[in-house]
Amino acid sequence: MKRFALVNVLLACVTFSFSAQAADKKIERLYGSKCGSCHGKDGKAQTEKGKKMAMRDLASEDFQKVSDADMTKAINDGLKKEKDGVKQEMDGYKEEIKAPEVEALVKYMREFKK
């Protein structure tokens, strides 16, 4: 009986590990499809679009000070502003990305920290 319980616990741990990895890959793909063309795979905004729009480096200390609430608002509602005469625009994804995925994207962007 103890052996059966141990096997079940181990299977649960392995299953959780695989689901967490799958979720991480899903968020990585979501970031790549919605954010990567401007912010770059590494978040440093060194893409053609990122440079053209003077996008912020998501890995910078300055950006990492932005609150989770402000990041969430930007993802949901988008941004339209001008910085040094350069238009910066980002589409909002409130209708496309569910709240748990937005939360996971914010956590994912926190991983860019230098």
Image: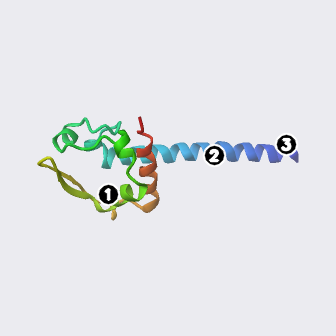
- Per the image, the residue denoted by label 2 is 15
- Report the Cα–Cα distance between label 2 and label 3: 18 Å
Q: Position of residue 66 (x, y in %)?
A: 37, 51
36 left or right of 15? left
Q: Position of residue 75 (x, y in %)?
A: 33, 57
Q: Nearer the viewer, residue 19 or 81?
A: 81
Q: Position of residue 103 (x, y in %)?
A: 45, 56
User: Which SS class for mark 3?
Assistant: helix
Q: Amino acid at mark 1?
A: Ala
- Report the Cα–Cα distance between label 1 and label 3: 50 Å
- Per the image, the residue denoted by label 3 is 3
Neighbours of disc 1 within 10 Å: few (<14), some (14-19), many (20+): some
Looking at the rendering, in which quadrant would you find the C terminus?
top left
Relative to 100, residue 43 above or below = above
Relative to 112, residue 100 above or below = below
- Report the Cα–Cα distance between label 1 and label 2: 34 Å
- Per the image, the residue denoted by label 1 is 74
